Image (cartoon, rainbow, N blue to C red):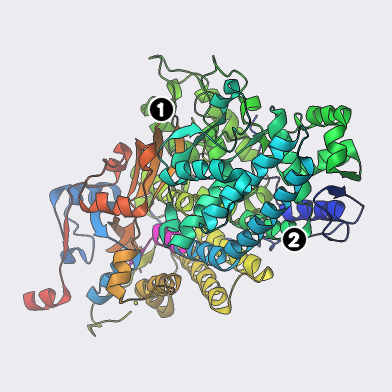
């Protein structure tokens, strides 16, 4: 049975700051050679509570039919579709046509100027949250986390050097020296001008060369210090992971932060190895000093709110076992001399639950049969557990076996995620692709589905990552009768999967540093006689959750003084926009008329989106066209690795156009909006894609085909010419 390690809605700050009190007494700065504990407990406030938004969902719309000649669609004369697009529109009540949009707001602004009814999509609303989430994370990293990491690096280098001085000549000397090298590398990655201690200069330079080349999987010079040749093969690191990507390519400072945090997030001091465990214990003992614990906790607690808790044991778990075995007070000299207690510690620490998600390159089961022993151990700032990575982990080799052709499922499919969350359409597509033919895949999928269905709602509210996933869950349900006709067919169900996977791709893109990867503007031209009243894609549950997510983002960051007044105001505005979309959706589903103010909100939607887009980019200078050139909607993120040389890339492309036949005031009309395009493809690990490279591929059309299942709602060669208002006047 799958075990979720998010530990419900409890903040890790509670546990860690309790331990801070236990380990550091009154928060003093004991010698690097002392370990002191007492019963003082310090509690950390949770970031913010989640407030659910109630939904009034009463779908009661009658079924309608779109005539083949569009004669019952009042504004059809304004749209000239080619045969392929018209056929899809008539059959499904909507059609998606390839577009070249680089931002959602542009589609809606053009509609406003051309008096075309807007079709507001969940895609546009979800993308809007992605833009602001990425902006907020980048702002917190630059203003808060990078300065804290500098303090942490300096402190840990100093404490490690002092520990090494004390332990020279003992069996702990190599472990202490490894830690000095470990923190020297982390410090140099963040600040390349860092002065290297002479004792570890050579090994640190060798490690940095591999990291900065980021081209291969190789034995880590730092982790292999003082080791025998027979253990070197198991100390390999995948250095392709250090290619800065996501928003971390924005400037050199963020690139350096990415590499340093990747180093601290990936390197494991394995519990099975005695010398590596000594290093982990020394780090744990050093972290009891408040001058390093405070910045460490600030980084950890903040990133936990955004993404989640570490999937690997770390400071909290190791500190608990240390206290259990050694008591409340002991020194480095004590620990290096008492072999009986040390053996007891080793026994206890190897019983601590290891990670759920494997992010280490390990060999076939015939070579390394005990995977858990190979991957369990201490991480200084471990990458975070996420529910989607857990799903992936249980649906690839080794968790599933071979298919009848003897092939192994080394990479997952994005569709695994919505299928696990209950999407029958996703499951059917996967079956058609042959994914259910892998040994144990059907059984594992069923277990995951049952477990996720049984999770308490609080589990989905514990941090922003889980809440984003919770919002996307609304896209996996079977849409009930009473919804508009265009939403009651398989094509729409597939469009919903496209929305789910595209927004999920943006989530993976924004959090690529912290999450674990499993291996295996408004206006008009004054032509008021044109009726351009539009429509909101009715999904009140999604808008309600998006409003709650926006509020949680604002309140949580405000609680820790991580949000300025301007961003707080924008998040409140985002919450209000989502609530307005929810209210309009509820009225549409009941067949109620909208107010003129609500229709005007739909008309002005492009300007609403542009406001948030501009606010998210306010740290960049330049004219609007340059901002559009340098900040495009398409993104790419690698989400899984099949050693030694393949990754799974998930990407969004140009924004496509959706035309839907919608009921407005008792009549049918065509409304136009924007939707994501979604791609999934294997790629070379040594060339993990950045957004810039992906944009180049899009421009040159050197891109993979869209998933086959998108053909149910897309007209791949479809075209539509929108007749301008002045052309209609000329005809009259």
The image shows residue 65 at horizontal and vertical percentages of 28, 52
**Picture coordinates of residue 704, whole percent (x, y):** 27, 41
Residue 58, visible in the rendered structure: no
Which residue matches tag 2? 291
**Image quarter for residue 187?**
bottom right
Circle 2 Cα neighbour tier, 10 Å, few/some/many (<14 / 14–19 / ≥20): some
Residue 586, x across and y down, in percent: 49, 63
Left or right: 54, with 669 as reference point: right
Res. 491 in view: yes
Q: What secondary structure is found at the residue carrying circle 1?
A: helix
Query: SS of the residue at dot 2?
Result: helix
Characterize the magenta stretch by its predominant secondary structure. Answer: helix
- Quadrant of the rendering where the N terminus is positioned: top right
| Between discs 2 and 1, the one toward the N terminus | 2
Q: Nearer the viewer, residue 546 or 60?
A: 546
Would residue 10 be found to the left or right of residue 395 on screen? right
User: Which mark, residue 431?
Assistant: 1
Alpha-carbon span between mark 2 and mark 1: 55 Å
Residue name at image x 40 percent, y 79 percent: 596
| Left or right relative to 334: residue 363 | left
417 to 611, vertically: above or below = above
| Magenta-tinted stretch | 118-129
Q: Looking at the image, is mark 2 or mark 1 nearer the viewer?
A: 2
């Amino acid at each position: 049975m799958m075990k979720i390690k998010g530990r419900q809605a409890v903040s890790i700050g509670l546990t860690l700051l309790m331990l801070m009190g236990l380990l550091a007494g009154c928060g003093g700065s004991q010698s690097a050679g002392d370990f002191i504990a007492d019963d003082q407990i310090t509690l950390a406030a949770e970031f913010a509570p989640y407030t659910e938004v109630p939904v009034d969902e009463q779908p009661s719309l009658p079924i309608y039919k779109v005539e083949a000649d569009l004669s019952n669609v009042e504004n059809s004369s304004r749209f000239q579709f080619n045969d392929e697009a018209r056929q899809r529109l008539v059959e499904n009540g909507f059609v998606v046509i390839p577009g070249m949009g680089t931002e959602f707001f542009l589609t809606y602004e053009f509609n406003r100027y051309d008096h075309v009814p807007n079709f507001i999509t969940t895609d546009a609303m979800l993308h809007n949250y992605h833009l602001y989430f990425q902006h907020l994370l980048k702002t917190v990293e630059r203003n808060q986390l990078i300065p804290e990491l500098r303090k942490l690096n300096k402190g840990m280098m100093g404490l490690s050097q002092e520990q090494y001085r004390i332990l020279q000549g003992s069996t702990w000397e190599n472990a202490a020296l490894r830690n000095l090298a470990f923190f020297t590398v982390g410090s140099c990655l963040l600040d390349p001008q860092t002065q290297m201690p002479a004792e570890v200069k050579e090994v640190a330079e060798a490690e940095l060369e591999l990291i900065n080349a980021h081209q291969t999987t190789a034995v880590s010079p730092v982790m292999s210090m003082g080791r025998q040749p027979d253990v070197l093969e198991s100390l390999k690191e995948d250095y392709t992971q250090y290619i800065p990507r996501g928003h971390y390519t924005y400037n050199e400072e963020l690139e350096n932060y990415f590499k340093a945090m990747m180093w601290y997030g990936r390197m494991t001091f394995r519990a099975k190895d005695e010398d590596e465990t000594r290093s982990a214990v020394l780090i744990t003992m050093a972290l009891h000093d408040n001058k390093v614990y405070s910045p460490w906790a600030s980084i950890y607690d903040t990133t936990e709110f955004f993404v989640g808790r570490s999937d690997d044991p770390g400071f909290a778990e190791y500190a608990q076992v240390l206290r259990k075995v050694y008591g409340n007070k002991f020194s480095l000299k004590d620990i290096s001399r008492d072999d009986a207690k040390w053996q007891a510690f080793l026994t206890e620490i190897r019983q601590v639950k290891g990670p759920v998600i494997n992010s280490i390159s390990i060999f076939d089961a015939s070579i390394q049969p005990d995977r858990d022993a190979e991957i369990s151990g201490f991480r200084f700032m471990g990458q975070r557990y996420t529910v989607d990575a857990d799903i992936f982990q249980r649906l690839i080799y080794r968790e599933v076996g071979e298919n009848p052709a003897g092939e192994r499922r080394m990479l997952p499919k994005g569709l695994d995620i919505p299928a696990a969350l209950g999407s029958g359409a996703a499951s059917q597509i996967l079956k058609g692709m042959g994914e259910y033919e892998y040994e144990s895949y059907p059984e594992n999928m069923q277990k995951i589905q049952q477990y996720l269905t049984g999770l308490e709602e609080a589990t989905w509210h514990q941090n922003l990552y889980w809440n984003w996933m919770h919002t996307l869950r609304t896209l996996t349900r079977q849409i009930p009768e009473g919804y508009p006709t265009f939403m009651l067919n398989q094509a729409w169900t597939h469009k919903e999967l496209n929305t789910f996977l595209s927004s999920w791709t943006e989530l993976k893109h924004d959090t690529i540093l912290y999450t674990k990867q499993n291996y295996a503007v408004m206006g008009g031209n004054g032509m008021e006689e044109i009726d351009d009243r539009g429509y909101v894609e009715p999904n009140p549950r999604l808008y309600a959750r998006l409003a709650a997510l926006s509020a949680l983002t604002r309140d949580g960051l405000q609680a820790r003084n991580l949000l300025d007044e301007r961003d707080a105001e924008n998040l409140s505005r985002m919450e209000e926009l989502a609530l307005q979309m929810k209210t309009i959706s509820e009225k549409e589903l009941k067949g109620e008329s909208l107010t003129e103010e609500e229709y005007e909100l739909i008309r002005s939607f492009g300007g609403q989106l542009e406001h948030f887009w501009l606010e998210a980019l306010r740290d960049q200078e330049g004219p609007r066209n340059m901002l559009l050139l340098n900040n495009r909607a398409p993104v790419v993120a690698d989400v899984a690795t099949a050693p030694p040389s393949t990754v799974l890339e998930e990407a969004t492309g140009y924004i496509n156009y959706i035309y839907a036949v919608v009921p407005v005031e008792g009549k049918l009309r065509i409304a136009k909006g924007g939707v994501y395009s979604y791609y999934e493809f294997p790629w070379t690990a040594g060339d993990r894609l950045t957004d810039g490279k992906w944009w180049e591929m899009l421009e040159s059309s050197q891109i993979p085909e869209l998933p086959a299942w998108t053909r149910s709602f897309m007209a791949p060669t479809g075209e539509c010419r929108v007749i301008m208002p002045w052309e209609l006047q000329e005809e009259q």
